[in-house]
Amino acid sequence: MLFTKAKKLCSNKNNYRFSRSISMSKFLKNTFYSTYLFMLVVCLMALSGCSTTSHKAVQPLLNKQTPQQRITQLQQLHQWKIKGKIAFFEKDTRNSFTLLWQVDENKESQQLKLNHYLGMNVLQLDSMANNHKIQVDGKTYHGHNLERLIYSLTGLKLPTQALTFWLKGMPFQETDSISYQKTTQLPQTLSSHYNNELWQVSYANYQQVDGYNLATKFSIKNDDLLIKIVINDWSITKK
């Protein structure tokens, strides 16, 4: 009899432990699930906040201008800055960088920075008139022919002088030829024999920036070289 009572007592104790173990397991599981949901909501709110604060409202394009009206307007645009990405494709090679380029035509100055996506600086340029200073791999170089200097240091072929016009959709030389979209009358392609070489520029994704209709996507072709530029931010200084 005593043995039977002890056996029941032991059985009840084990059942209690088992029941308590299940309850604790459910508690931990529910607690973990609640914590996970809470953290998920917090992360989604943070991501939503980031995307909201970094988004820039796109302004509608200006009313249609004639090509000559547009060029006349752009001739007043002397100070600008762009941020974005640039990629060079040539045969089997590809090089991609973040791009920061600031130009002040009134002061004949410019600053250009190319960085790898990991943040490592590839090229940093400071120019005043025809005096160019470039920093590459911690060393500083000087020269008067910017495009030749960039190519000799990095192997990158970049028509910087002409690009300051082409990016705005303007001809750099009188012989440059521009074709326009029929509906918007905005530049669609540009063809130039710059430095006795054929360069072809394609324009896409126009946006209105402080009173100017400007493209934000470019494809620039020269023989086997293709340069693609995507501008995330146009900044205009009006003086």
Image: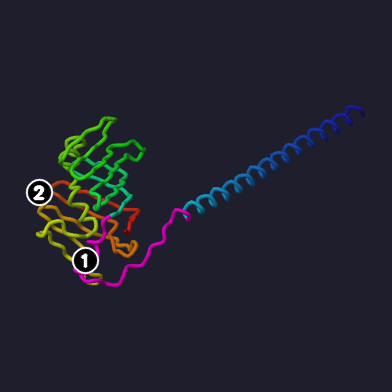
The kind of secondary structure element at disc 1 is helix
**Residue wearing tag 1:** 72
Q: Amino acid at mark 2?
A: Asn
Whole-percent x, y for residue 94 in the image: 24, 42
Q: Is residue 185 left or right of residue 28?
A: left
Task: Please tell me in which quadrant of the rendered image residue 155 appears.
Answer: top left
**Residue wearing tag 2:** 195
Looking at the rendering, the stretch of residues picked out in magenta corresponds to: 52-78
- State yes or no: discs 1 and 2 in contact (Cβ < 8 Å): no
Task: Please tell me in which quadrant of the rendered image residue 111 appears.
Answer: top left
Residue at (68% x, 40% y) in the render: 28
CA gap, disc 1 and disc 2: 25 Å
Residue at (27% x, 38% y) in the render: 123
Disc 1 or disc 2, which is closer to the eye?
A: 1
Q: Amino acid at mark 1?
A: Thr
Whole-percent x, y for residue 136 in the image: 26, 33
Whole-percent x, y for residue 35 in the image: 63, 44
